[in-house]
Image: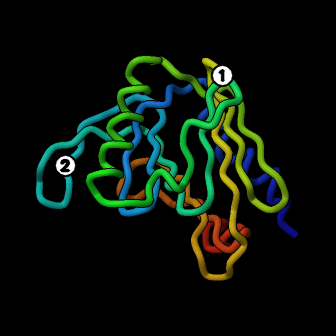
Amino acid sequence: MINNQREIEQRLSVLKGLEWSGVSRAADMLTLGFGPKREEKNFYGVPKQVSAWALHIQCAWTLSETGKTIATEKSLAGSDEEVNAFVMSLQQLLAQRAPIVVEGISANSECCLFISLSKAFRLIVATNGAADDEDWRFFESKRTARHFVIEGGKIDPWSLS
């Protein structure tokens, strides 16, 4: 039997000591980048900067600073204009407070994720447990990298093969 907590903490331990280096979104999915950035071309051949590691979140999440909530998944609801403005403000906050470094990773048996960051930032990712719904995924930002996927509050077995 898989120990979800141990597996998650082990997989994401590579983030410890790395800088939180990117934030974006795709529809209502929060995308975070960690570690040094490098240039890569997108599907159209246009150069873009990508962080070494990516965390894509499609479930409930809360970002707090000194214990005060500054953003949640509801921040990605609304018109494109509103959501884009929110993402831009989060990017500005990240730039103003940089460097923000991953200090700790912890998880629980329900595959919820807790990331402690420097400067009193904390990210909590709470799975929804709905079968066939992807909660979050973590991967190295390389086209051939294997993704570690949490779906329905469980580790997708494909992630372990």
Q: Amino acid at mark 1?
A: Ala
Callout 2 amino acid: Lys
Q: Is residue 72 above or below residue 128?
A: above
Which sits in the foreground, 86 or 131? Answer: 86
- Residue 141 at what x, y percent from top left? 41, 48
Dot in front, 1 or 2: 1
Q: Classify 75 as above or below 151.
A: above
From the viewer's perspective, tell me whether residue 69 is left or right of residue 95: right
At 67% across and 38% down in the image, what residue appears?
A: 115
Point 52% across, 56% down: residue: 74
Residue 73 spot, x, y in % from top left: 54, 55
Q: Residue at x 19, y 49 (%)?
A: 41
Say which residue label 2 marks.
41
Residue drawn at 44 percent across, 60 percent down: 77
- Dot 1 alpha-carbon crowd within 10 angstroms: few under 14, some 14 to 19, many 20 or more: few
Residue 118 percent across, percent down from the top left: 62, 20
Disc 2 secondary structure class: strand
Residue neighbourhood size for the residue with mark 2, other residues' Cα within 10 Å, grouped as few (<14), some (14–19), many (≥20): few
Residue 50 in which image quadrant:
top left
Task: Work out whether mark 1 precedes mark 2 in sequence or the reverse, and give the earlier one.
Answer: 2
Which quarter shows the N terminus? bottom right
Determine which residue is flagged by label 1.
Answer: 120
Q: Say which of 130 and 37 sits in front.
A: 130
Give the vertical position of 77 relative to 92 (above or below): below
